[in-house]
Image (tube, rainbow, N blue to C red):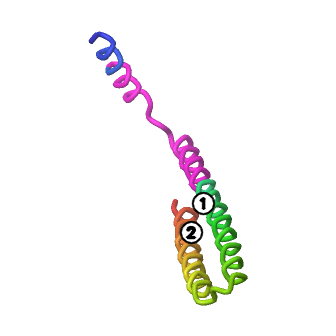
Amino acid sequence: MGKIIRTVRLCRMLEIHWKPDTGTMALIIVVVKVVIIVVVVVVVVVVVVVVVVVVVVVVVIIVLEAVVVAAVVIVVVVVAIIIVVAVLNSIIITIVESP
């Protein structure tokens, strides 16, 4: 019980004393933006890898002469790529334009 009270007191002291100045806040915001951009880039890379795998599968399907299935898969992949690019674009614009 004593440890909990000491921890609470320590947190309250830090809360009172740690008032971040504008420079610190700006640094924190920049770090958060960089982390978000890195996450977005990783997501884009993963999506590209998935698309390449799907295209390879589609080529295999075409080789196996299931043309209708291949056409449906191609349409679905193209629509998915368009949606992903639009979403990522809006996310990046939001990150860059936010103060």
Does the magenta run of residues contain 59?
no
**In the figure, is residue 85 to the left or right of 63?**
left
Is 33 drawn above or below residue 60 in the view shown? above
The amino acid on which the numbered mark 2 sits, given as a three-letter code, is Leu
Would you identify the image quadrant in which residue 58 lies? bottom right
Per the image, the residue denoted by label 1 is: 43
The amino acid on which the numbered mark 1 sits, given as a three-letter code, is Val
The residue mark sitting in front, 2 or 1, is 1
Distance, label 2 to label 1, CA atoms, is 9 Å
Does the magenta run of residues contain 33?
yes
| Part of the protein shown in magenta | 9-36
Query: Which element carries disc 1, helix, strand or loop?
Result: helix
Per the image, the residue denoted by label 2 is: 88
Of label 2 and label 1, which has the lower sequence position? 1
Residue 32 image point, x, y percent: 55, 49
- Which residue is at 67% across, 73% downward? 57
Is 88 drawn above or below residue 71 in the view shown? above
**In the figure, is residue 6 to the left or right of 85?**
left
- Which residue is at 44% across, 30% downward? 18
- Which residue is at 64% across, 72% downward? 54
Query: Which element carries disc 2, helix, strand or loop?
Result: helix
In the image, 69 versus 43, the foreground residue is 69
Residue 87 image point, x, y percent: 52, 71
